[in-house]
Image (cartoon, rainbow, N blue to C red):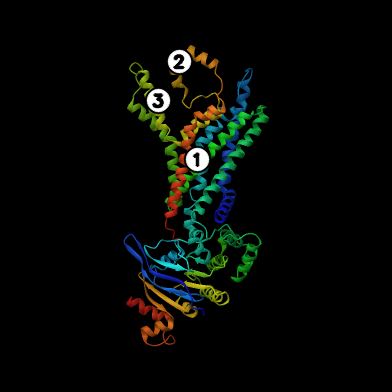
Amino acid sequence: MQGLYAIFKKELRDHFTSYRFVILFALIAMVSFISSYMAGIHMRENLEGMSGVKFPFLLLFSSTGALFSMIQFVSFFGPLIGLVLGFDSINRERAHGTLIKLVSQPIYRDAVINGKFLAGVVTISIMLISIVLVISGFGLALVGVVPGIEEIWRIIVYLILSIFYISLWLGVSILFSIFFKGIATSALASVALWIFLSFFVSLGADVLANTIVPIGNANETTPEDVIKNYRIKETTARFSPMVLYSEATATIIDPMQKTTRTSDLINLRMNPMEEMLSSRFENPLTLGQSLLVVFPHTTALIAITLICFAISYMVFMVQEIRT
Amino acid sequence: MDNQTIIKTSNLSRRYNGQTAVDDLNFEVKEGEIFGFLGPNGAGKTTTLLMLLGLSQPSSGSAVVCGMDPIRQSKEVKRLIGYLPENVGFYGDLNAVQSLEYVANLNGLKGEVVARKTDNLLDLVGLKQDAKKKVAAFSRGMKQRLGIAEVLIKDPKVLFLDEPTLGLDPDGALRIIDLIESLNKDQGITVVLSSHDLHQVQRISHRVGIMINGKLVAEGSIDSLAKEKFGVGEKEYSLEEIYMKYFREG
């Protein structure tokens, strides 16, 4: 334990004093701030004259004011935080000849990797929590709405999910820093994987679905085809952690969302009259129900994070360290 | 001198994908001695040291270090052995005191003890004036001395020094060698010293071992090795001549 704590402390200190952390934090804080500000401005206009708006506070995070919402932004660029914090964690020590010094101290070898991972997770948590708190405070002043108990709980669940999501990428980058001896190589590899999983998988899902079940011609496609096409697209896209995370957080932050599916498929089965009726009597889900809806997503995200860390752990434990 | 064996290997071997780095190694280091561990680059000296520390798994054979098995009791062994690797690295953005404190924390030392030890050790290795200087600005000799201070902070029984004088100017090398000798004399620390600086090794070592191509070809006092090879004692032949003779025949 002594070794773990010493390494944890040193890593945390390194994170908070490094320029890359300061730059990244400034960037993320700025963008989140702006997107929430935009959301706040638009909210005033949109909510004017409306009555019975449920959970206005959460709109601060979820409404796409100008270009994107705060939660969309985190799902797109949050992984960068994880990658930047971890991509050189092991191979930098190796290159500088400090890794052999670390492991020749009376500590268990896993203390090195555990300490580094923990320090990263704590850094990520502090970053996210402070951003969300600042936005909340800002929202209080700007919009003048006070969050209810349920809204606070939803924000907490959102934070936990986000910490796991970003830690997943931290785990990936630490894994690459163990695999690749070159610091630049591991940085490039982790960014490449991030781009692939976050952007190309969703594109590929479209292509795959349309190849297997083409739905181009409106006359020949049956509703069954459309559903099949959608199912393939959905399943493939969920290989991307970003899709998993976005679907999960969108459902958590927006209680009106009853499923993680996008609305066009649901609308397909209703005629306009039904749709109008259903929206009139629409009520928000309770937090428990929302959690239940995203339970598979949450489990998958946490599982991927743990698997990633477990692989790094195993590789590092059996690796020969000479320098 | 106390004659108890502190390190003993029996048929210690290490093979890397078909190549044998360390081949059936049998040698002993006695408590309180300076053991000169010699051999050409790539002879397997570092691999042997890593196996004795429990950082590398032997392919076969075993070792006993301070009465313990370095594989099973790696943590306990590492508590007693200070290992200064060849080309030891430092965190450039820390100063000398912070570097020492970090190593002290890794060894489970806390609070006032750390400050006192850090102070004493910097004094011992002659880095007191540079205590607040960033390690990145240190010369090679200063880094080596800081490295020695770092391995001493755990109060080791045995020191493994892998090429501590490599690339140092004559004055810097001499300071390191004198430091090693005084540590051995004043504190009774056993030292395993791997070095190519044969002249200095001859000056301070009690016994030497010569390793060539993974095999230990000679072990004993310099005097006995000289007698074995040339028939006369150490007075007539330097360690360099003895070493070259073993090397050519090896």
- In depth, the one of B233 and A298 nearer the eye is A298
Q: For the residue carrying disc 2, how many other residues have a C-alpha within 10 Å: few (<14), some (14-19), or many (20+)?
A: few
Residue at 43% x, 50% y is A314
Disc marking residue A4: none
Q: How far is the residue under mark 3 from the one under mark 1?
A: 27 Å
Residue B119 image-quadrant placement: bottom right
B32 in relation to B93, above or below: below
Drawn side of residue A57 relative to residue A204, left or right: right
Q: Residues within 10 Å of mark 1 (few under 14, many from 20)?
A: many
Residue at the spot of label 1:
A79
At which x and y percent is residue B27?
Answer: 41, 73
Name the residue tied to disc 2.
A270
Nearest to the eye among marks 3 and 1: give it: 3
Looking at marks 2 and 1 on the same chain, the residue that comes earlier in the sequence is marked by 1
Circle number at residue A230: 3
The kind of residue on which mark 2 rests is: Met
The answer to which of marks 2 and 3 sits earlier in the sequence is 3
User: Residue A80 placed where, x, y %?
Assistant: 50, 41
Depth order, front residue of B175/A111:
A111
